[in-house]
């Protein structure tokens, strides 16, 4: 009981001390507001005679700096300044004058450092924030992948697809993949692979566990399970805490995303090509006639009416900017399947999107990798474009392809860009890179496993990625195929922007 009373006495004393300190701070703040004793650029007034009062003024300076210069100070410096403030507050609680003075000197030095940075920013801008965005290729859960993922209890587990690439995807501040299947549920019929994909919801869990933040849902398989399946796919994705881009549940929902990533607002929109429907007010996706109600819920374009697409792309760009977007990424499902070079439509569309103001264009659909290109818009802006990221996971193996025996359908990538925000408010692209990937088909406990292997040349021993024997040779061949397509364009960009060239061949 005595111990309890003593504990309560100490707690009351501590609370009283904090109240006295906060009271002193409030009095000082009131005085400074009334007579303008200090500012970020001024010095502490001589009216502060006690260490506690001086500390209060310093704390107020810090708060003022953080408020007035939010977004202009590097995160590391903000952390230092905040830590100095917290240490000063803690010292004030002790009422130890010597400790308060010492911590106040540290805090004042951090303030001086910040002031120097802010003054330097007027003539020499510096990076205050970065946001890395990763984009991977097509997720195609073909029938063999589907049924090899089924467990003895009837459930489906797809996590064995992603363990090798998990650390790479999770390293990005924001990661997207192209979900080229639907999750229509059993209400849409039985689970199935190609040609009409209806895949269990656990495919989403697998990729979320590997660091995926967004699923691209506008593609030619979006309507494989009809309107209900398309809408259910979006609903389930969102329910699992993942962003969906390209299709939406309701007409009132925005058909784009503006995401605040580390203090940089990035606008993103996803389109797919559509077919001629022959019916007014109804779109056709992959030859499937959509309902009039569902047609506006997918972001799409018609190759036979590109002016309408360009108008919509420009309007969407402006809407994203109005919502605060500081940089814009266009994801687009386009091109010809199995063609390793972009067609004229792709090139024309890419240039027009650059003219609109796109910073990044990420393409998909051909099921093979296509080149990287840097474009210049009409306003002199620069746009980086990867025409196709290839297959991230699929059963399009050499042995399964009738007319595509080159191996390119086994290849994919993680395409990464890093946006930089400068102290003057400007947004630029920093690092741009490509990590080639290859689908490693192996057998584990009598079941086929389609494991995505990262072809990281900074790692000398690829057995780390589950590759052994002839699989290493096949993975190297995949790396060389991919870099033969993207290496020149990528290295032209990197070297012209002060970055080192990447390795384009591996023995």
Image (cartoon, rainbow, N blue to C red):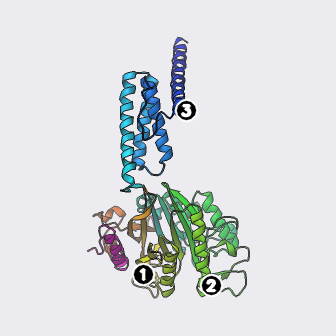
Residue at position x 70%, y 66% from top?
250
Q: Answer yes or no: is residue 328 visible.
A: yes
- Contact flag, marks 3 and 1 (Cβ < 8 Å): no
Question: In this figure, which residue is indicated by the disc labeled 3?
Answer: 34
Circle number at residue 367 = none
User: Residue under circle 2?
Assistant: 275
Front residue (pair 144, 128)? 128
Give the secondary structure at mark 3: helix
Span highlighted in magenta in the image: 478-506
The residue at the far left in this view is 507
3D distance between C-alphas at marks 2 and 3: 69 Å
Q: Which residue is mark 1?
A: 398
Give residue 49's position: percent from left, percent from top: 43, 23
Foreground of the two, 256 or 28? 28
Verify whether residue 479 appears in magenta: yes
Mark 2 residue element: loop
Is disc 1 placed on a helix, strand or loop? helix
Q: Of the residues tagged 1 and 2, which is closer to the observer?
A: 2
Whole-percent x, y for residue 325 in the image: 54, 62
Q: Tell me which residue sits at (46%, 81%) in the image.
A: 400
Query: How far, Cα to Cα, is label 3 from label 1?
Result: 78 Å
- Mark 3 packing: few (<14 Cα in 10 Å), some, or many (20+)? few
How crowded pointer 2 is (Cα within 10 Å; few <14, some 14-19, many 20+) is rated as some
Q: Earlier in the sequence, mark 2 or mark 3?
A: 3
């Amino acid at each position: 009981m005595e111990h309890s009373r003593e504990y309560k006495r100490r707690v009351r004393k501590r609370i009283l001390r904090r109240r006295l300190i906060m009271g002193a701070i409030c009095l000082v703040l009131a005085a400074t507001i009334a007579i303008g004793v200090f500012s970020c650029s001024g010095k502490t007034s001589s009216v502060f005679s006690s260490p506690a009062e001086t500390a209060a003024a310093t704390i107020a300076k810090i708060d003022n700096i953080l408020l007035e210069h939010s977004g202009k100070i590097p995160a590391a410096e903000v952390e230092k300044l905040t830590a100095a403030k917290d240490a000063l507050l803690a010292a004030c609680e002790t009422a130890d004058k010597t400790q308060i003075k010492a911590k106040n000197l540290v805090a004042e030095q951090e303030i001086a450092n910040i002031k120097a940075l802010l003054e330097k920013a007027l003539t020499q801008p510096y990076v205050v924030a970065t946001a890395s965005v990763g984009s991977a290729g097509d997720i195609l859960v073909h029938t063999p992948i589907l049924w090899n993922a089924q467990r003895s209890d009837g459930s489906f587990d797809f996590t064995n697809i992603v363990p090798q690439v998990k650390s790479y995807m999770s390293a990005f501040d924001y990661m997207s993949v192209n979900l080229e299947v639907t999750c229509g549920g059993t209400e849409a019929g039985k689970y199935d692979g190609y040609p009409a994909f209806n895949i269990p919801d656990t495919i989403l869990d697998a990729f979320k566990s590997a660091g995926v933040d967004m699923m691209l849902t506008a593609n030619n398989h979006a309507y494989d399970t009809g309107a209900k399946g398309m809408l259910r796919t979006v609903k389930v994705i969102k329910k699992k805490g993942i962003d969906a881009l390209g299709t939406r549940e309701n007409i009132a929902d925005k058909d784009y995303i503006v995401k605040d990533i580390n203090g940089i607002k990035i606008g993103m929109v996803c389109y797919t090509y559509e077919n001629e429907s022959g019916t007014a007010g109804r779109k056709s996706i992959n030859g499937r006639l959509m309902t009039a109600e569902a047609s506006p819920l997918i972001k799409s374009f018609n190759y036979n009416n590109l002016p309408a697409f360009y108008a919509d792309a420009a309007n969407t760009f402006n809407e994203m900017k109005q919502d605060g977007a500081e940089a814009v990424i266009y994801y687009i499902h386009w091109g010809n399947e199995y063609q390793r070079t972009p067609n004229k439509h792709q090139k024309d569309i890419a240039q027009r999107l650059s003219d609109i103001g796109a910073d990044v264009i990420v393409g998909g659909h051909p099921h093979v990798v296509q080149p990287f290109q840097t474009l210049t818009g009409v306003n002199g802006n620069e746009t980086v474009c990867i025409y196709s990221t290839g297959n991230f996971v699929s059963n399009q193996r050499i042995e399964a392809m009738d007319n595509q025996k080159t191996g390119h359908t086994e290849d994919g990538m993680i395409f990464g860009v890093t946006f930089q925000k400068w102290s003057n408010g400007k947004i630029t692209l920093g690092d741009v890179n490509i990590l080639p990937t290859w689908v490693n088909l192996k057998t584990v406990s009598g079941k086929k496993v389609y494991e995505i292997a990262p072809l990281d040349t900074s790692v000398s021993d690829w057995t780390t990625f589950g590759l052994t024997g002839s699989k290493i040779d096949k993975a190297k061949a995949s790396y060389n195929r991919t870099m033969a397509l993207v290496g020149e364009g990528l290295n032209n960009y990197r070297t012209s922007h002060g970055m080192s060239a990447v390795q384009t061949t591996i023995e």
